[in-house]
Amino acid sequence: MKRREFIKKGGAGALVLGTGLGVSGVAQARPEFKWKMVTTWPKNFPGLGTGANHLAALINEMSGGRIRVKVYGAKELVPAFEVFDAVARGTAEMGHGAAYYWKGKSEVAQFFSTVPFGMTAQEMNGWMYHGDGLKLWRELYTKFGLVPAPAGNTGVQMGGWFNKEIKSVADLKGLKMRIPGLGGEVLKRAGGTPVNLPGGELFTSLQSGAIDATEWVGPYNDLAFGLYKAAKYYYYPGFHEPGTTLEAIVNKKAFDALPKDLQAIVLNACKVVNQDMLAEYTARNPAALETLLTKHKVDMRPYPKDVLEVLRKYSQEVVEELGNKDAFSRKVYASYKGFLEQSRRWTGISELAYLQARDLS
Ligand code: CA
C-alpha cells in the first residue's frame, strides 16, 4: 500500500502529514507515524530497558521526527511475555525482547537468541549480518506477521546465583532455577526444574524461595536487581548464554506501510543499538563485578570443569534434537552449526589464542 493510500484509509499509527517550525526554528516534520514499543524489560532497566529507549530515540532522531516511538516497560501496556503477540496483532507496532522467550510459539526461534555452548556475540553478529542468520530469522517471523532485527547483545553472561555449592552435576538435581531458553532444557536433562520468569520478578522469587536459583545477565544487571542479597554463590561462565542477541520486532503491516527511507532508518537504528549495547556491557560489567566482589563480598566461583563437560554433552543433545524437529529447524541448525564450526577454528587461533597470550603472567 502506498503511504498516501495508507493514510487516507486511516491505517494504525498514521497521522496527517505536515511540516512546521520546531522550537529551534528548523523546519521539522510532524510525525507521520506514531508507534508504540512494548518491551519485556522493566522500564528504564540498565542496558536492556535503556537500550530499548535508545532505539526509540534513534528512530525519532534519524527520521527527523517522522516516526515517533513511545516505549512501554513490561506490564505498562502488556505483560513481559505478551510482547510477541501484542506486536503480531498490532496492539503495538514494535517490541523489544529476546527470541528465546517465544519458544512456545516457535522452538526454533531460540537459535536467534543464544545457544548453550554456541556462538559468542561477535560470532552471532557474523552469522546474522554476513551469514544466513538474519535471513532465516526473517523467514521464520514472516508467518507471524513480524519483521525481526538484532537489537542488542549482552556478551557472555554469568552462570547464575545459587544458595548451595555446585560441586557436581548431582547438585543440579531437583534445583528449581529461573533459566530461559535452551539452557533450561539443559538443566532439565541434569535433573533440575527450569522456570521462566520476567526479570522484574527474579529478586522476590529468589528471596521468597519460590525458586532455588536464578540466572539473569551479568554483573551490571545482576547488581541492579540486588540478586547478591538473595543468594550466596555467583557462578561463571554463563555456558547457557554465551552472547545473547536481543531482538526488535516490528509488526509487518506497520513496517510495510513505511516508505523505503524510513524502513532503512528503523533497521539501521536496530543495528546501531545492537552494537552499542554490547559496548555498554563491555564498559559496565567490570566495575559492577568489582562492586559485587569487594563491597558486597560475593562468593564467586567457576563451575567445576567436569560439571561443564557434562553440561556441554547435554547441550549438544538438546540442540541437535531441536535442530531436527522439522524441515525448517534442520535448515536453521545446518546454517548455525556450519557457521559455528568454521568460527570455532578461526576464533581459536585469533581471539582465544590472543587472549591467552595477553593474560600470560
Ligand atoms: Ca540470562
Image (cartoon, grey):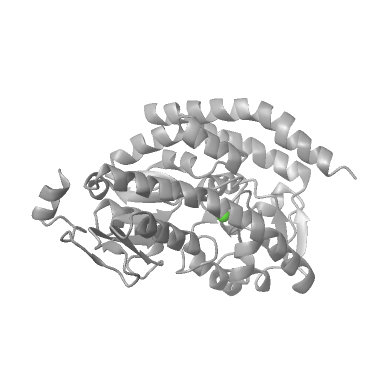
Image spot of residue 150 (x, y percent) = 45, 45
Image spot of residue 176 (x, y percent) = 58, 59
Quarter in which the C terminus is drawn: top right
Residue under the point 59% across and 40% down: 122
Q: Is residue 330 left or right of residue 209?
A: left
Q: Quadrant of ligand 1?
A: bottom right
Residue under the point 53% across and 31% down: 320
Q: Is residue 220 left or right of residue 258?
A: right
- Picture quadrant where residue 164 is located: bottom right
Residue under the point 70% across and 47% down: 169
Count of numbered circles in the view: 0
Vertical relation: 163 (above or below) 129:
below
Question: Is residue 19 in view from this perspective?
Answer: yes
* Closer to the camera in the image, 185 or 293: 293
Image spot of residue 154 (x, y percent) = 57, 52
Q: Is residue 187 left or right of residue 197?
A: right
Residue positioned most to the right: 361
Q: Is residue 131 left or right of residue 359?
A: left
Residue positioned most to the front: 25
